[in-house]
Image (spheres, rainbow, N blue to C red):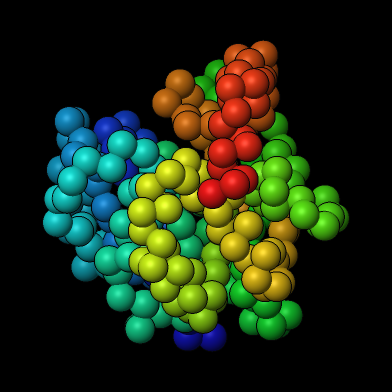
Amino acid sequence: MNVNCLILLATYNGEKYVLEQLNSILNQEGVTVKIVVSDDNSSDNTLQVISSLKDSRIEILPSSESFGSASQNFFRLIRDVALDDFDFVAFADQDDIWYSDKLFRAVSVLSQNNIDAYSSNVLAFWEDGTKKLIDKAGQQKENDFLFGSSGPGCTCVFTKKFMINFKREIILRRALTKKIDLHDWLFYAYARSNNYDWFTDSNPSMLYRQHSNNVFGANSGIKTYLVRWNKSRNGWYRKQILF
């Protein structure tokens, strides 16, 4: 199966982990990969680390304005990168580790079932060696997209058809997307509200690194609970849904 996969990678001060992530993507089995990187004006050596690989499958977009969040950086990638030469589009964070069959499994599920959107469970891991399965593969429920995503955006893989349509929407509504904080939630909401079939794989596809710089990360521990509780109290969830 000759399948071309585009991987959109948003980076910011990721020099510590990005090399391990890139190698796990470049070593994907059964597919051809192209990685396009958008860096949010890192102040560390992120870009130097990426460039040191000297791999023609990696392209770094020119510096742009400061985006201030991973979501806005991903929206920039979607808007600016041409999709014509690719069959599927996937998203990557800078600090995870992909299993070698991550993309092959995803595109096989999408192709064999004639669906357009895929995500999966992940195995969260911490520097102290702790690991925890993050299970998002429960049965979908009506209007569940109003309350969150179907797993981390870094597990998402989409058909070109889906992504072309999504790209058109965020270009038309660029001012609106500037108010969106979580790209993975928007992917899921757009898919479900437009009658795309979405499959969430019960098999974890990657190691999902947890550290102090995660935007949300695994929903685990009292600190994460308090962050989410405060967001609920101050109206953040309601505003995101209304957007």
Residue 160, above or below 121: below
Q: Which residue is rendered at x = 56% and y = 39% of the image?
A: 239
Q: Which residue is rendered at x = 33% and y = 49% of the image?
A: 73
**140 sits to left or right of 18:** right
Front-most of residues 32 and 75: 75
Point out the image quarter for the N terminus: bottom right
On the image, which quarter does residue 194 sit in? Answer: bottom right
* One can see residue 212 in this view: yes
On the image, which quarter does residue 241 sit in? Answer: top right
Residue 229, above or below 162: above
Pinpoint residue 117: horizontal percent, then vertical percent: 62, 68
**152 sits to left or right of 197:** left
Pinpoint residue 55: horizontal percent, then vertical percent: 22, 62
- Number of callouts: 0
Pinpoint residue 132: horizontal percent, then vertical percent: 69, 32
Front-most of residues 32 and 167: 167
* One can see residue 74 in this view: no
**50 sits to left or right of 197:** left
Q: Which residue is rendered at x = 47% and y = 85% of the image?
A: 2
Front-most of residues 61 and 128: 61
Residue 55, above or below 72: below
